[in-house]
Amino acid sequence: MTAIIEGMLNGNVRSLAKAITIVENDRPGKKELLKAIFPRTGNAYLIGITGPPGAGKSTLTDKLIALLRQQGKTVGIIAVDPSSPFSGGAILGDRIRMQQHALDDGVFIRSMATRSHLGGLAKTTVDVIHLLDAAGKDVIIVETVGVGQDEVDIVKIAHTTVVVMVPGLGDAVQIAKAGVLEIADVFAVNKADREGAAKLVNELRAMLDMSTGDWKPDIFSTVARDDVGIADLLAGIYQHREYVHGKGLDQVKFKSNVRQELCTYLMDGIIELANSYPDFEQLVDNIYQKEITPLEGAEKLFKKMGVKNNWLTTGGDDAEKN
Amino acid sequence: MAKRIKVLVGKPGLDGHDRGARVVARALRDAGMEVIYTGIRQTPEQIVATAIQEDVDAVGLSCLSGAHNNLFPKVVNLLREKGAEDILVFGGGIIPDGDIAGLKEAGIKEIFRPGSSTDETIKFITDQVNQ
Amino acid sequence: MTCSERKQAFQQRQQQWQELVDKACARFPERRENFATTSGIEMKRLFTPEDVEQVDYTEDIGFPGIYPFTRGVQPTMYRARFWTMRQYAGFGSAEETNKRYKYLLENGQTGLSVAFDLPTQIGYDSDFELSEGEVGKVGVAIDTLADMEMLFDGISLDKVSTSMTINSPAAVLLAMYVAVAEKQGVAPAQLRGTIQNDVLKEYFARGTYIFPPSPSMKIITDIFAFCKDTLPNWNTISISGYHIREAGSTAVQEVAFTLADGLAYVDAAIKTGLDVDVFAKRLSFFFNVHNPFLEEVAKFRAARRLWAWLMKERFGAKKPASMMMRFHTQTAGCSLTAQQPDNNVIRVTIQALAAVLGGTNSLHTNSRDEALCLPTEDSVRIALRTQQVIAHESGVADSVDPLAGSYLIESLTSKIEAQALAYIKKIDDLGGVVKAIEAGYIQNEIGDSAYAYQKAVEAKEQIIVGVNKFTIEEAPPENLLTVKAEMEQKQRQKLAQVKESRDNEAVNKALQQLKVVAEDGGNLMIPILAAVKLYASLGEVCGVLRQVFGEYQEQ
């Protein structure tokens, strides 16, 4: 373990890769590893890239990497693809579009399958981000398909979230319904040479004009395949970074992220503990038979754990906010 | 729970016939493995760098153009150079009988030829990785 | 008998038969619950006139040489002249391949077909880093005009028709061919042959792309425009389903995706201002022929009919020649087995017969040892003899389209046509074939079929003799042809010598001129021809174009 820690902190690619596997597979030594590297984290700038399948996220990422490298930045990429719900396996093909960077020492690309992570994919991704961060990557890009809550959670961790849209996959109203307006800091309308691109940009703009937030996301038209509009997009990302820095939001975000992590571990622990009680299944049955409510079931368990649970007994309002 | 096996499937060289590689990638996925598919026209260097970053258990190489004697051993040697000789390497494609001994000697653990089943490949990887 | 009486009699007899069937099935269940073709079309127990009720003889089947060309593109077909027997060949150096060509011509082959190695197909010279290990392996290595001169040494280019399997750098190889002819004193107008020049399928089935789709299409239409005046007898494109099928597609997908590619080329040519009735007659096609005999025969007939209809209805073609689908066929490489390789002779025979009964215009028969290595002289001769036996001994060539009117064949023909058209409409909806490729649609459709086939083989639902049934212990095969490792080194030396002895200043100027034309959007054929005549290498020419056009990235 010491060798892996030392190796990854000294730029050894194999050690970093091994460290990620330890975290991803919950292997022994994970705690020690994360403890050793934790003081070195908090330096990288995190960019989340999300959008529907076929939006060209990987190609866009590929071009962003190239530009960041020209600027002398080292880059870490986490490319998340869904696991097969049937076999649990996955074909991770995102990096097929990034292979021009395979031999660049300043670029580390790691593919991850969503698996059925206990406690969510987000947790594992945060740990992998920590590792890339501690290994000295200046910028870390997390690319996910924007479909599930897990993916949205990952995006929330990022300092700047880029939502990639393409014409032809629905109008802006549908996009608003999908909830991406709230998470986007920057929009990229990719495949902008296609019919309907201008219309999509206009619709998005109209919708954003109505938003009242402090930061108003900008929209960039790109044709990632032809390397068109990437520099402007990156400039837009930097602009958002200035805003984040200016307001001290990166520190706020870091704090909220670690708070979230702490809570995730707490939840995991509580759930594991609850599961260890012999009558846990019985309790589930009781709820299933409508003998008690889920809330009452939780109360019973907390009582057993000796947890004073004021928030629970005050009702669901506060709980929902959590 | 059994360990989740991670395999890189790649096509070194200029050969563009990726039917076999893609079929194998799907079969491995359906056997519960995670497959990194790198696409065609990869250099041995790219394949090795990818295998290391992704920390895969095995690398499967496919070549139908006859360049296997140059390309397959190169992958094994580069892995060795990078201290990653523990990564299992196997291959497939149009490979004459006469070349197999040489390839195995060079460190390619198994060669799957036309007509071999994906089940054989799955079994081979599972057995080797769980050893 | 009146019409209704006949119908009644038919139904009565049919009922009688059905009762027999039920009894028979009760005693001897059929081998499978459902029989279907590779494309999922039901193979009924019995086809009857009921299955072709919708088919109008005059309109849908008609007469050979007349729209819609279901029965063939020529009025007398093989009664006048057999199909062109054209064996695809090329390996190692130009010298070795030249010897093989002469061997084939001496044995009665009637056309040449050039296989290039992968570096050549992807526009790299033999001394390029990525070419290592690939030089001369799957075809002949061509770096400069010097290699091309050697390749056709002693073969008069006004006497043979030559097909070249070359796509992304087709313009360069065609230019070299024209230059060789000039040196032989043969005018370009006398040249007959075909370049494959079908880049679209490279993006989803074969993989030897260089440039992105849009400049690739531009180069293709440049060739169309150049050949229209300079090489009027040259087939400027061979729109290829062969590799689509090899990549694992079904018969219907092969027809659909090939024709969809064809539509894209016609569209592109019309957009550059070419008249459909001027260039369309120089379009040719290239299909695969696989084992399922009946479906394959129907496939060719369906493809001809559908193409004629598309050209007429979609593009308003007026001349019959613009609507005629002329095609080359090759037996299915993917059907060859490494186990008991002699069995491949039988497979190739069945496939070749299907191609002839489907009305192919030229044919390549694979050699039995191609699942193991490059074909030996003996194997190539047997493959050629297979065609000769079909032509001269079987009698199938003596009457035009002899299977027409078969209830099964006509029914399958209509179904394949309808299903292929449905695919084409789907691709239209996606915005055309380039968009469909970029969205991964075509790749996924083929990938699904390939995977389904593999699973069927492994489950032994699809039997392959000698592979998953009737297997034997075999000794490793002997007498395989291999390309010697020194060949690569020699080829590099040869290239170095050419580069030393040519006028390098002139070459640089020509390449510079090519760059200017590429940037300005002018016709590329002229500066390419000028450059190759000065012995500029393939890699140098393609290198300039790579700089200007960029390279395609796999999806």
Image (tube, coloured by chain):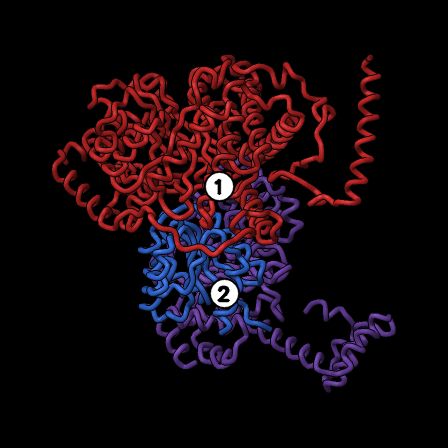
Chain colours: A purple, B blue, C red
- Percent of width and height locating residue A66: 38, 53
- Image marks 1 and 2: residues in contact by CB distance under 8 Å: no
Q: Of the residues shown, which amino acid type is indicated by label 2? A: Phe
Q: Which residue is mark 2?
A: B124
Crowd tier of the residue under label 2, counting other residues whose Cα lies within 10 Å: few below 14, some 14–19, many 20 or above: some
Could you tell me which residue is drawn at 40 percent across and 36 percent down?
C382
Q: In the rendered view, would you say C283 is above or below C254?
A: above
Q: In the rendered view, would you say C184 is above or below A81?
A: above
SS assignment at label 2: helix
Image position of C334 (left or right of C56): left
Q: In the rendered view, would you say A3 is above or below C192?
A: below
Mark yes or no: residue C501 visible: yes
Could you tell me which residue is drawn at 37 percent across and 63 percent down?
B104
Q: Nearer the viewer, residue B130 or A40?
A: B130
SS assignment at label 1: helix
Task: Find residue A7 and report its image quarter.
Answer: bottom left
Q: Nearer the viewer, residue C158 or C510?
A: C158
Could you tell me which residue is drawn at 35 percent across and 44 percent down?
C374
Q: Which residue is mark 1?
A: C246
Q: In the rendered view, would you say B87 is above or below C407?
A: below
Image position of C214 (left or right of C99): right
- Percent of width and height locating residue C49: 72, 23
Give the alpha-carbon distance from disc 1 to disc 2, as whole Å.
Answer: 27 Å
Q: Chain of mark 1?
A: C
- Percent of width and height locating residue C274: 42, 19
Could you tell me which residue is drawn at 75 percent across and 68 percent down?
A317
Q: Of the residues shown, which amino acid type is indicated by label 1? A: Glu
Q: Nearer the viewer, residue A164 or C56?
A: C56
Quadrant occupied by the N terminus of chain C: top right
Residue A1 is tagged as: none
Mark yes or no: residue A64 visible: no
